[in-house]
Amino acid sequence: MSDPGSIVQAVALAAGLAWASGLRLYLVLFLAGLLSHLGYLQLPESMRLLENPLVMGASALLLLAETVADKVPGVDSFWDSLQTFVRIPAGALLAAFSLGTADPALMLAAGLVGGTITAGTALSKAGGRLAINASPEPFSNWTASLGEEAAVLGGFWLMLMHPWVFLGLLALFLLLVAWLLPKLWRFLRAMIGRIAAFFRSGGAPRV
């Protein structure tokens, strides 16, 4: 992997899989396995397991469940609360193994960075969905869900065809996440406080 182009492609693959896993883990697993099987994505030997029919079948079933759950207000936040514990370690592992190297230090570094990227994406998604679910209408929820799916598909295309562009956009996204997460955390604390006030008072909380 001494060729600069190959290095950039490998970094884009590791970072892209980590980022996309925070949005749609099972879409990432199924898409990576399918594209590799069709010859459009060159996965290292350490990740060729994603092409296995059993793995692709399991990821397809989970993708179907996630696609449905992600479009139902309330259910999407419950799903996110469970899947966050899966997405972060999975994103870290995908980033680590995508380098296809036998150097444990490099794999560990990639896993730590990848896990951090996945965590930022997953927490931003979960917090954003809680904010959207505060609205009574479902259309913004469906729009957000379809937008996330389009972002993953578009991200895969950029990652493969224009890795430098993808990495630049990813850097901007991470800066946005760093700015957004504290605001989402304050919103979440306020919602928890209102829910706690509701149960303490036995009725509607004071505004």
Image (cartoon, rainbow, N blue to C red):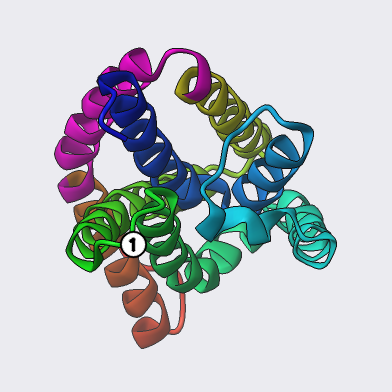
Q: Nearer the viewer, residue 53 or 86?
A: 53
Other-residue count near label 1 (Cα within 10 Å), few / some / many at <14 / 14–19 / ≥20: some
Asked if residue 131 is positioned above or below residue 53 in the image, the reply reads above
Query: Could you say where residue 184 lies in the image, as x and y percent from the top left?
Result: 27, 49
In percent of the image, x 73 and y 53: which residue is there? Answer: 51
Query: Could you say where residue 107 lies in the image, as x and y percent from the top left?
Result: 28, 60
> Is residue 202 rendered to the left or right of residue 35?
left
Residue 207 visible? The answer is no
Disc 1 marks a residue whose amino acid type is: Met
Query: Could you say where residue 29 lies in the image, as x and y percent from the top left?
Result: 63, 52
Asked if residue 141 is positioned above or below residue 111 in the image, the reply reads above
Q: Which image quadrant for residue 183?
A: top left
Q: Nearer the viewer, residue 5 or 59?
A: 5
In percent of the image, x 52 and y 62: which residue is there? Answer: 80
Q: Nearer the viewer, residue 41 or 80?
A: 41
Label 1: which secondary element: helix
> Is residue 117 rendered to the left or right of residue 93?
left
Q: Which residues are magenta?
A: 160-182
The C terminus lies in quadrant: bottom left
Residue 123 within the magenta-colored segment of the rendering = no
Asked if residue 207 is positioned above or below residue 204 in the image, the reply reads above
Residue 17 visible? The answer is yes
> Is residue 59 rendered to the left or right of residue 95?
right
Q: Which image quadrant for residue 10?
A: top left
> Is residue 56 rendered to the left or right of residue 17?
right
Residue 173 within the magenta-colored segment of the rendering = yes
Q: Which residue is mark 1?
A: 191
